[in-house]
Amino acid sequence: MLRDIQDEIIRLKKEKDFCILAHCYQSHDILEIADFVGDSFALSKEAAKQSQKNILMCGVRFMAETVKILAPEKNVVLSSADAGCPMAEQLDAPTLRELKKMYPDYTVVAYINTTAELKTECDVCVTSASALDIVRKLDSDKILFIPDINLGTFIKDNVPEKEFKLIHGGCPTHVRMSAEHVKTAKKAHPDALVLVHPECKPEVTALADYVGSTSGIMKFAKQSDKKEFIIGTENSIVQHLQFDCPDKMFYPLSKDCVCHNMKLTTLVDVLNCLKGTDGDVIEMSEETRLKAKKCIDEMLRLG
Ligand code: 13P
Ligand code: SF4
């Protein structure tokens, strides 16, 4: 049954000229039918390169918006209309304009997990994979980082030569993990390395053996000589790594680290999007797109 749906998706995407992009927090059955799987940074870079005229983004809204910003000529469809990223909606443009007035000489660095509207007010975007590199390369020494205080703190601690202003935003999924979770998991698996995403709280990143983006965590685990890993990011990564490395063992740092927005998309939703009966077509005014594009172009240039 599952295989039948996957076969139908593969047939339809060719017939309807669709490219399927999937964030690695999607479930394994979706990754199997995707043309490209990656973290936010890899997906942004891949977006404009695709030859198909339609793109189906299996992920959350800001990722589909990023594709539309970079590839306006394409019909971009988000796999599930309700799949937002709560962090991306925590700060609105009027509030950011107020912050910019308070800190006029600061460069506004936005996590890519922001709305297109908010991006129109920012100087440069970063993803968790590119943040340290880009912030170090910026001419400016004064950074207003939005909206994730945990990723912001991680960058600030690793780039001590620059001055930072942070705001109180964050990922409701990653903040569920605490130092207590790390201590409990280490006790249960004393030989395991702890690999966590920088969206986790500083009390968690401080106890980790490695802090990095989704793709960074996967790469680290695959290349390491170690055999056991405690994974502190969305729990689909535990499953994907276990598939990719059957000779190693992967444990979730917390069973609560599940992003319900990423999990909204099912294989049947993907099928229905290709049939044209589901999904949300991304629309954006050309003015918003061009203004928002500046900070993404800057990210791609520096990253
Ligand atoms: P990555 O940048 O690692 O893909 O993370 C995206 C995201 O939404 C993490 O929660
Ligand atoms: Fe947004 Fe967090 Fe889900 Fe990533 S894991 S999409 S930051 S809510």
Image (cartoon, grey):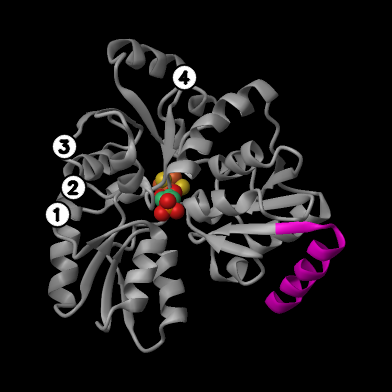
Numbered mark located on residue 47 in the image: none
Spatial distance from mark 4 to mark 1, Cα to Cα?
Answer: 32 Å
Answer few, some or many: residues within 10 Å of disc 4's Cα (few below 14, many 20 plus, some between 14 and 19).
some
Numbered mark located on residue 93 in the image: 4
* Mark 3: C-beta under 8 Å from nearest atom of ligand 1: no
* Mark 2: C-beta under 8 Å from nearest atom of ligand 1: no
Q: Residue at x 56, y 63 (%)?
A: 37
Residue on which disc 3 sits: 161
Q: Where is residue 151 in the image (x, y as percent from the top left)?
A: 29, 43
Q: Where is residue 100 in the image (x, y as percent from the top left)?
A: 35, 15
| Amino acid marked by disc 1 | Ala
Q: Which element carries disc 3, helix, strand or loop?
A: loop
Residue 252, above or below 61:
below
Residue found at the very far front of the displayed protein: 139
Q: Which element carries disc 4, helix, strand or loop?
A: helix
Q: Which element carries disc 1, helix, strand or loop?
A: loop
The picture quadrant where one finds residue 36 is bottom right
Numbered mark located on residue 206 in the image: 1
Numbered mark located on residue 202 in the image: 2
* Mark 1: C-beta under 8 Å from nearest atom of ligand 1: no
Magenta stretch: give its range.
Answer: 1-19
Answer few, some or many: residues within 10 Å of disc 2's Cα (few below 14, many 20 plus, some between 14 and 19).
some
Along the line of sight, the residue nearer the viewer: 8 or 134: 134
Spatial distance from mark 3 to mark 1, Cα to Cα?
Answer: 20 Å
Q: Position of residue 183 (x, y in %)?
A: 13, 64
